Image: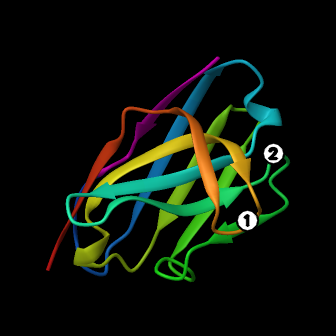
Amino acid sequence: QVQLAESGGGLVQAGGTLRLSCAASGRAFSSRNMGWFRRTPGKGREFLAGINWPGTNTFYVDSVKGRFTISRDNAKNTLYLQMNSLKPEDAAVYYCATLTSWNGGSRATGAYWGQGTQVTVSS
């Protein structure tokens, strides 16, 4: 089992930046593909980005490509999401998750989840 805890959310102005962290404890973070999702009342849960276990391959959905960067530090058991050029429509609760299935692209299923961190973007 893996325990995940997100941090780094908050209130930011449009155009601003935030860096989310996801601290993992438990079994074998470094051998698991990981992803970031977000949930909004209108769109439900959305897969945003994935990274393979060694950190050599990443994927982004079109809505965040070029603005968000997923990365990981396996020595620190931590996953990151650098978010630049934030837009009001990026406001959501952001979750990290281990990926139980991932095709390397847009199809991903989370297994273990963090509690989420709120991101609010003011216009």
**Residue at x 36% of width, y 40% of height:** 116
Mark 1 and mark 2: span between their CA atoms? Answer: 10 Å
Q: Quarter of the image for the C terminus: give it.
A: bottom left
Q: Mark 2 highlights which residue?
A: 53
> Which sits earlier in the primary sequence, circle 1 or circle 2?
2
**Residue 68 falls within the magenta-colored stretch:** no
Q: Residue at position x 50%, y 79% from top?
A: 67
Q: Quadrant of residue 95?
A: top left
Residue 112 lies left or right of residue 27; in this view the side is: left
Q: Where residue 84 appears, x then y in whole percent?
A: 44, 74
| In this view, 61 is above or below 32 | below
Residue 88 lies, in percent from the top left, at 22, 76
Residue at (66%, 46%) from the top-left corner? 34
Q: Are marks 1 and 2 in contact (CB under 8 Å)?
A: no
Mark 1 lies on residue: 58
Q: Which residues are magenta?
A: 1-9
